[in-house]
Image (tube, coloured by chain):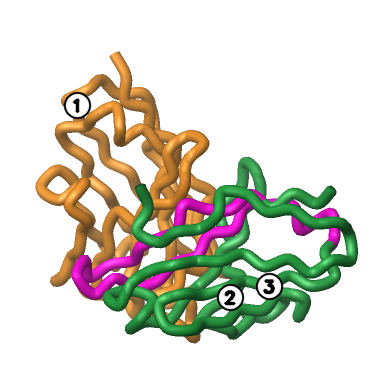
Amino acid sequence: QSVLTQPPSASGTPGQRVTISCSGSSSNIGSNTVKWYQQFPGTAPKLLIYSNNQRPSGVPDRFSGSKSGTSASLAISGLQSEDEAHYYCAAWEDSLNGVVFGGGTKLTVL
Amino acid sequence: EVQLLESGGRLVQPGGSLRLSCAASGFAFNNYAMSWVRQAPGKGLEWVSTINNVGTSTYYPPSVKGRFTISRDNSKNTLYLQMNSLRAEDTAIYYCAAPYYYDSRAFDPWGQGALVTVSS
């Protein structure tokens, strides 16, 4: 049972816009910034979004993040087949003095 | 180029011990806190431990506290994870991770991972 709640799966067709939600509480998302990671099978996760809505260098602007209260969302516009991966949200947890993750969302491009 | 290379993963019996290493290169290792994150087979990510840049402060979740010990040798640019009293549920790929330059609570980059299997 993950501290942050994500839907286990999401899907879309090429060119579509899809969103993945991440729900937390006042002690994590509510008081700290959200990160998003992308992971392909057999590889290490890669940072996709930091500080709620910032993209590291090299991440396409098709990826965007937002946060409101104790929830956050990752949006992918102009969906491409190479976006098919697992996506994880994360945030600092004040009570743990460490990071908590969502359970992950498997994105399928139909 | 920043690189993190884990080693030490193997099959170990329940109740046994194992030490993982993570060799860092391409950045000023002694300036940054470092972390371990694990991923059980087919499951999500779980933060395991963090150590500050000089090794004087360490942090763990309840699931591993008292059994795992994180440490570092800044003279060797190496991070360690000593795992004792291992359980089947500790079976996972263990990644070492550095803090992202613009957000110290984000992890980037990650190593390639070391597989730890706890089984009799």
Quarter of the image with the C terminus of chain B is top left
Q: Is residue B50 left or right of residue B85?
A: right
Does residue B120 appear in this view?
yes
Label 1 – label 2 distance at C-alpha? 38 Å
According to the picture, the residue beneath numbered tag 1 turns out to be B16
* Residue bearing mark 3: A75
Q: Which residues are magenta?
A: A80-106
In the rendered image, residues at marks 1 and 2 fall on the same chain: no
Foreground pick, B115 / B2:
B115
Check the image and name the residue furthest to the top. Answer: B120
Judge whether B57 appears above or below B46 on screen: below
Whole-percent x and y of residue A37? 56, 63
Task: Kindly indicate the quadrant of the structure image that contains residue B49.
Answer: bottom left
Is residue B11 toward the left or the right of residue B51 in the image? right
Query: What residue type is disc 2 on?
Result: Ile
- Three-letter amino acid code at the position of disc 3: Ala
Q: Position of residue A44 (x, y in %)?
A: 56, 52
Q: Nearer the viewer, mark 3 or mark 2?
A: 3
